[in-house]
Image (cartoon, helix red, strand yellow):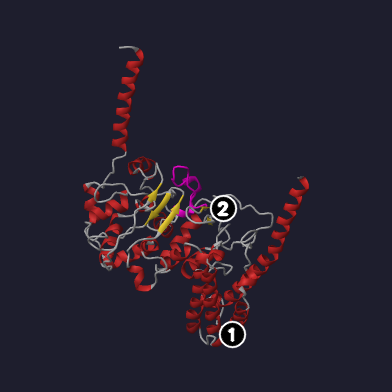
């Protein structure tokens, strides 16, 4: 019996450990997205001067990251458990989640294809991207702390 | 008569008195004539600001509405809580299904006293415990603004609550305990105007404390942990601590808070999420002065550690 419990625990641990990498990876992607978006938001807020080259670089990097998002690989079934703020709704409504990710990809692709050349043009670009962040986080992320 | 008989009669009388006392104490109270007179005539243009500060659309518009559709307050949003499921009603100016037939005084009674035109208690899922702190003139302005919105037909289904919460009269007791128009956070004389404005917006129309403050077993907000964050009453997860205490937003500047309310981006460029998304969109419609006032107030409230338990995790918490 004791061995059985240990074996089950070991499997449980191994499962958690297996998803720990997936979770850490997808969190790293989000952090990186935040970093690029931050470059843009700072300009919009007047904390940084408008810099067309920096805008292009940030949008390009952001778009590369976002296009690389693979929902099936990064959100396998069971990876709602562990140190994650991903909502179980992702797995309850995988099609809805995929649709949000696709809209995000479309938004960053559009922005990266025509990076803003002025602060005035940057504002709606940042707003459109922000809209995608919050729309997905509204349903598919849970605040845990 | 023997002793048990006398006791039984005494018990019946006591129960009767208790019942009467209960009935008396739990009677839905309306605003008095003086308060009704103070309402005055509302101004729709000013009322729009109160409308967005109050976040009416978050519950009373159809879910995920945008643009003009946000102004169709047909109701229907369901709040699934431990008490049961609350359904937001139609509050559009439709005469049959909405509040089109309401007088201004009816409206003020709903907002400030949580009482319907027919004299029934509303459940405090409708956040009148916060709205009770609103200025009568603002309520009148809001009434005037809401009259300008489109009338939409359609009734939302009733709440489905478990006993004893299905017993509306009991809300009268709840109100005795928790319905109070005094400010939550006392402020010393000489407190800057914008902090007081922020207090008004947060504690009154904005009703931030309804989600960001933990509740006790009777469903009242715990004023000793005001805005310290709470386990979400509805859905999963938590509503964050917005005080400067441990786990809160002590490292956010007033500018960070105002900017978050305007753009939805946190200081580390994460985005707003959950039900705060709709709230943030509403607050973004206020003036920069109003957002700055909210920020100033949040920096002035007593710092508290998180009003919810740490999440069970063996790993270091990430964001």
Circle 2 sits on which residue? B245
CA gap, disc 1 to disc 2? Answer: 39 Å
Q: Is residue B199 above or below residue B29?
A: below
Q: Which residues are magenta?
A: B210-228
Nearest the eye: B143 or A1: A1
Q: Is residue B16 above or below residue A98?
A: above
Residue ID for mark 1: A56
**Relative image position of residue B74 (x, y in whole percent):** 32, 63
Image position of B26 with respect to A9: above or below: above
Q: Chain of mark 2?
A: B
Q: Which of the two residues, A24 or B297, is positioned nearer the viewer here?
A: A24
Q: Residue A109 versus residue B268: which sits nearer the camera?
A: A109
Looking at the rendered structure, the secondary structure element under dot 2 is: loop
- Whether residue B317 is in magenta: the answer is no
Q: Nearer the viewer, mark 1 or mark 2?
A: 1
Q: Is residue B216 magenta-colored?
A: yes
């Amino acid at each position: 019996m004791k061995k059985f419990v240990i074996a089950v625990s070991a499997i449980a641990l191994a499962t958690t450990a297996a998803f720990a990498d997936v979770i850490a990876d997808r969190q790293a992607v989000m952090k990186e997205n935040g970093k690029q978006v931050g470059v843009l938001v700072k300009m919009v807020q007047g904390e940084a001067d408008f810099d067309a080259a920096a805008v292009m670089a940030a949008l390009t990097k952001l778009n590369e990251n976002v296009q690389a998002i693979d929902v099936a690989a990064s959100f396998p079934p069971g990876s709602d458990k562990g140190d994650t703020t991903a909502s179980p709704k992702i797995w309850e409504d995988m099609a809805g989640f995929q649709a949000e990710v696709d809209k995000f990809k479309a938004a960053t692709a559009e922005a990266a294809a025509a990076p803003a050349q002025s602060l005035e043009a940057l504002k709606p670009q940042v707003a459109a991207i922000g809209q995608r962040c919050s729309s997905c986080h509204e349903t598919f992320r849970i605040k845990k702390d | 008569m023997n002793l048990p008989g006398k006791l039984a009669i005494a018990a019946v009388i006591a129960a009767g008195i208790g019942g009467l006392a209960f009935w008396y104490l739990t009677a839905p109270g309306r605003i008095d004539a003086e308060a009704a007179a103070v309402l005055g005539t509302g101004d729709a243009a000013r009322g729009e600001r109160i409308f967005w500060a109050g976040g009416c659309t978050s519950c009373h518009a159809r879910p995920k509405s945008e643009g003009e559709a946000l102004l169709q307050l047909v109701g229907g949003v369901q709040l699934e809580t431990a008490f049961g499921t609350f359904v937001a009603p139609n509050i559009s100016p439709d005469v049959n299904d909405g509040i089109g037939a309401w007088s201004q005084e009816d409206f003020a009674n709903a907002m400030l006293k949580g009482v319907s035109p027919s004299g029934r208690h509303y459940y405090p899922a409708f956040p009148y415990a916060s709205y009770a702190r609103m200025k009568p003139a603002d309520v009148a302005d809001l009434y005037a603004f809401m009259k300008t919105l489109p009338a939409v037909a359609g009734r939302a289904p009733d709440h489905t609550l478990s006993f004893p919460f299905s017993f509306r009269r009991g809300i009268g007791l709840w109100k005795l305990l928790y319905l109070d128009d005094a400010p939550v956070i006392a402020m010393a004389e000489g407190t800057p105007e914008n902090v007081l404005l922020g207090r008004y917006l947060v504690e009154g129309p904005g009703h931030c404390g309804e989600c960001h403050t933990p509740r006790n077993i009777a469903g009242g907000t715990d004023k000793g942990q005001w805005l310290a964050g709470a386990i979400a009453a509805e859905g999963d997860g938590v509503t964050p601590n917005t005080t400067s205490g441990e786990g809160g937003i002590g490292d956010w500047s007033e500018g960070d808070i105002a900017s978050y309310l305007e753009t939805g981006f946190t200081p580390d460029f994460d985005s707003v999420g959950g039900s705060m998304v709709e709230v943030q969109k509403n607050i973004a419609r206020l003036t920069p002065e109003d957002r700055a006032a909210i920020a100033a107030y949040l920096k002035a409230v007593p710092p508290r550690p998180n009003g919810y338990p740490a999440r069970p995790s063996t790993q270091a918490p990430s964001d």
